[in-house]
Image (cartoon, helix red, strand yellow):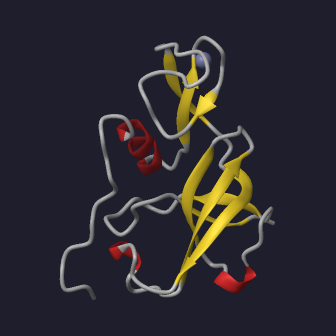
Amino acid sequence: MSAYPRPLPRVTPDNLPFWEAARRHELRLQRCGACGRIWWPPGPVCPDCLSERFEWAPVSGRGRVSSFVVFHKAYFPAFADAIPYAVVQVELEEGPRLTANLVEVPPAEIRIGMPVSVVFDDVTPEISIPRFRRAP
Ligand code: ZN
């Protein structure tokens, strides 16, 4: 048990729809209404064509680990009770990369290219980034 409250997800006006969808157990990212590009992190314009038209579109939640870091100290207070732990970059099938926590995989077993899928646990103050697990 931490001696201080754990941080809430870093909810901003840009990423609020992402967390609202996560609470409904959906993974949604911004999709450009002009060129169709799906992008992350969130922003007010498409990074390809600068269009301001976009929607929050559902994505598959499947991807592969493109990089990872194993932490041996409490760099993020939210994970102080689980050391060591890994933070991974997941390259989604749709293209964008998400920073995520990989659960149920010992840090020594994490490999670049490992297939993973999103975990739709309830969003709680303990979860400050999306969580993924190994895909079959
Ligand atoms: Zn675009």
Would you place residue 53 above or below residue 84 in this image? above
Q: Position of residue 64 (x, y in %)?
A: 75, 57
Would you place residue 79 above or below residue 59 in this image? below
Q: Where is residue 100 in the image (x, y as percent from the top left)?
A: 55, 61
- Between 40 and 24, the one nearer to me in the picture: 40
Would you place residue 48 above or below residue 124 in this image? above
Quadrant of image for the N terminus: bottom left
Q: Where is residue 55 in the image (x, y as percent from the top left)?
A: 51, 22
Q: Is residue 94 left or right of residue 98?
A: right
Q: How many numbered dots are placed on residues in this image?
A: 0
Give the residue displayed 26% in from the left and 72% down from the top: 6
Query: Quadrant of the rendered structure where residue 31 is?
Result: top right
Q: Is residue 25 left or right of residue 12?
A: right
Give the residue displayed 28% in from the left and 60% down from the top: 8
Classify the position of ligand 1 by quadrant: top left, top right, bottom left or bottom right.
top right
Q: Is residue 120 left or right of residue 133?
A: left
Give the residue displayed 81% in from the left and 66% down from the top: 136
Q: Position of residue 30 (x, y in %)?
A: 53, 30
Give the residue displayed 66% in from the left and 55% down from the top: 90
- Between 61 and 89, the one nearer to me in the picture: 89
